[in-house]
Image (cartoon, helix red, strand yellow):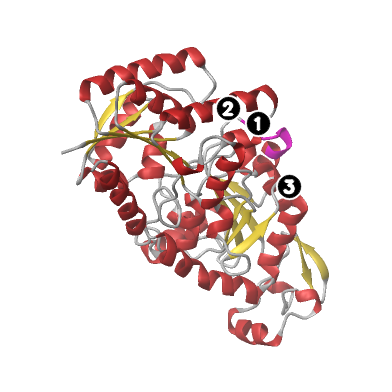
C-alpha cells in the first residue's frame, strides 16, 4: 500500500480540519499524521486509526526552530520513503514541502485554507510573502480550497496558475451532513443547555464559533452587538434587551401581512419582547492577535454575551442558536459556515473568499463588508426584524450545503486526485 503523510502544524488542525477523512484515506493508503505536541498528536491519531510521527513546530516566525523541524522531518521521510506528502496550514506547509523536496518525495501537495499574511503589513508581510512563495516552489501541486483563494494567489504572484487546482466546489474536508444535523441533537440536550446559560427558547441568539482573536472579527462583532436596536412600529427603537418575537400562532399571518414601518418586526405587545444574545464558542487566545481590552471587558460584563470557551462538540450550541455571526477578516473555506448551514442556521459573513462562496446573499445568509461595525450592526438587526427574510434563509440553509459540500463528494474528489498523481 502506498504511503501518504498528512501534516499540520498542530494536532487540533488534524482533528478539526480533516477528522474522519484520515480514516477514510487510510482505507486506500497507509496514512501517517504529523504535527507538533506529541501527546495530543497521539490522541488524535488513535481517534482516527492512523499512524503518527511527532515533529515540533511553532505557529510564529521562528527561523532556527523551523530549520530544525525541516531537518527532523527530512530524516523521517528519508527513512519511510512515502509516495506523497500533503501539508495543511502555513508553517506545516513550509516545513513539510521543504523536507519532502530534499527527501526526494515525488508528490508534494499543499492545501491553502487561508492566508494570514493578508492582514500583515511592512516587513512582516514581506517575510510571509516569501514563505508562501518558498512553500509553493517546493510543492509539486498547490490546492486552494476556494476559487477566490486561487485568484488571490495568482494576483499575489505566489506561483504560476498551472500549479494551482481547486477540487470540486471547494473546501478541504466538506461537511458531514449526518453529524451536523438538527436531528442529531436531542431536545432534552437543548433544554438543559438553554437553562444552564440563561437562554429563553424565545431569545434570538447569534452564535460565533472559532478562536476569539482579532482577525476573526470579534472586536467588531462585540461592538456591533452592543449597538443593536430593532425597530418596533408602535414603540420606536428598542435595545437588544427589549426585542420582541411575534407569537408563533400569528407568525404566518404577520409574514403574509407585511412588516409595517420600514420592514420592522410587527409586535403584538410588550409582554412578547425577548432578548437578543451573543453566544461565543471557542478558545480565547492571548498570545497571537489578542482582542482589544474593551472587547474583553464587554465579553466579561455584558449580561447578554455568553462565552463558553472551547467545546469539543459544537452541535448543541448551534441547536440553541438562530444565526451564525462570522465577520472574519480572512478565511480559506470556513468549516464553521458549512456546519452552521447544515444545522439549519443562516449566516452573517464578511465579504471574503470562502465565505462569499458558501453564502449567497439573501438566500442562505447576508454578506457584509470586512471590518465594518455599522454594516454588521445593520445586518444583525435585519436578521432579527425581517421575519420573512430570516425564515426564507433558514429554510434554504441546509439544502444549499447538502447540494454542494457533502463530505463524501469532497473526499471522493481528493481520493481521485491522489490516485491520479501517483499513477
| Quarter that holds the C terminus | top left
Residue 187 pos. (x, y %): 41, 65
Q: Which marked residue is nearer to the observer: mark 3 or mark 1?
A: 1
Is residue 393 something one can see in this rendering? yes
The residue range painted magenta reads: 289-295
Q: Specify the quadrant of the image occupied by residue 33.
A: top left
Q: Secondary structure at mark 1?
A: loop
Side of 366 relative to 397 (left or right): right
Q: Assess whether mark 1 and mark 3 are in contact (beta carbons under 8 angstroms).
A: no
Residue for badge 2? 128
Q: Secondary structure at mark 3?
A: helix
Q: Earlier in the sequence, mark 3 or mark 1?
A: 1
Residue 86 pos. (x, y %): 35, 36
Residue 411 pos. (x, y %): 32, 52
Q: Residue furthest left?
A: 1
Residue for badge 1? 120
Q: Specify the quadrant of the image occupied by residue 266.
A: bottom right
Q: Specify the quadrant of the image occupied by residue 349.
A: bottom right
- Spatial distance from mark 1 to mark 2, Cα to Cα? 8 Å
On screen, 333 above or below 40?
A: below
Q: Secondary structure at mark 2?
A: helix
Q: Which marked residue is nearer to the observer: mark 3 or mark 2?
A: 2
On screen, 226 above or below 40?
A: below
Residue 69 pos. (x, y %): 39, 18
Residue pictured at 52% horizontal, 29% vertical: 133
Residue pictured at 32% horizontal, 26% vertical: 39
Of residues 391 and 109, the one drawn nearer to the viewer in this rendering: 109
Q: Assess whether mark 2 and mark 1 are in contact (beta carbons under 8 angstroms).
A: yes
Residue for badge 3? 223
Of residues 123 and 358, the one drawn nearer to the viewer in this rendering: 123
Amino acid at each position: 500500500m502506498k504511503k501518504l503523510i498528512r501534516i499540520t502544524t498542530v494536532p487540533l488542525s488534524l482533528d478539526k480540519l480533516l477528522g474522519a477523512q484520515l480514516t477514510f484515506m487510510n482505507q486506500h493508503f497507509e496514512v501517517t499524521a504529523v504535527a507538533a505536541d506529541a501527546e495530543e498528536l497521539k490522541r488524535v491519531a488513535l481517534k482516527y486509526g492512523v499512524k503518527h510521527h511527532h515533529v515540533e513546530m511553532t505557529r510564529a516566525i521562528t527561523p532556527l526552530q523551523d530549520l530544525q523541524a525541516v531537518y527532523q522531518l527530512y530524516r523521517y521521510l528519508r527513512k519511510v520513503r512515502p509516495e506523497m506528502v500533503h501539508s495543511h496550514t502555513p508553517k506545516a506547509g513550509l516545513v513539510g514541502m521543504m523536507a519532502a523536496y530534499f527527501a526526494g518525495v515525488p508528490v508534494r501537495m499543499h492545501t491553502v485554507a487561508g492566508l494570514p499574511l493578508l492582514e500583515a503589513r511592512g516587513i512582516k508581510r514581506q517575510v510571509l510573502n516569501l514563505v508562501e512563495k518558498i512553500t509553493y516552489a517546493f510543492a509539486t501541486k498547490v490546492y486552494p480550497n476556494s476559487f477566490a483563494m486561487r485568484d488571490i494567489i495568482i494576483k499575489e504572484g505566489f506561483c504560476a496558475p498551472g500549479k494551482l487546482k481547486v477540487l470540486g466546489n471547494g473546501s478541504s474536508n466538506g461537511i458531514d451532513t449526518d453529524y451536523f444535523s438538527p436531528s442529531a441533537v436531542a431536545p432534552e440536550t437543548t433544554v438543559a443547555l438553554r437553562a444552564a446559560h440563561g437562554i429563553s427558547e424565545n431569545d434570538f441568539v447569534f452564535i460565533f464559533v472559532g478562536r476569539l482573536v482579532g482577525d476573526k472579527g470579534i472586536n467588531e462583532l462585540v461592538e456591533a452587538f452592543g449597538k443593536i436596536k430593532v425597530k418596533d412600529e408602535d414603540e420606536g427603537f428598542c435595545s437588544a434587551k427589549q426585542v420582541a418575537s411575534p407569537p408563533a400562532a400569528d407568525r404566518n399571518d404577520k409574514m403574509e401581512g407585511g412588516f409595517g414601518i420600514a420592514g420592522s418586526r410587527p409586535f403584538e405587545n410588550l409582554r412578547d419582547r425577548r432578548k437578543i444574545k451573543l453566544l461565543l464558542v471557542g478558545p480565547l487566545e492571548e498570545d497571537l492577535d489578542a482582542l482589544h481590552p474593551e472587547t474583553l471587558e464587554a465579553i466579561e460584563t455584558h449580561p447578554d454575551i455568553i462565552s463558553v470557551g472551547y467545546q469539543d462538540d459544537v452541535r448543541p450550541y448551534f441547536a440553541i442558536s438562530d444565526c451564525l455571526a462570522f465577520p472574519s477578516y480572512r478565511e480559506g473555506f470556513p468549516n464553521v459556515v458549512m456546519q452552521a448551514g447544515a444545522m439549519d442556521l443562516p449566516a452573517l459573513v464578511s465579504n471574503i473568499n470562502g465565505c462569499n462562496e458558501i453564502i449567497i446573499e439573501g438566500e442562505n445568509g447576508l454578506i457584509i463588508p470586512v471590518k465594518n461595525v455599522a454594516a454588521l450592526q445593520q445586518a444583525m438587526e435585519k436578521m432579527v426584524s425581517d421575519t420573512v427574510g430570516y425564515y426564507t434563509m433558514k429554510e434554504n440553509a441546509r439544502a444549499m450545503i447538502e447540494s454542494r459540500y457533502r463530505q463524501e463528494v469532497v473526499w471522493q474528489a481528493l481520493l481521485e486526485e491522489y490516485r491520479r498523481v501517483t499513477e
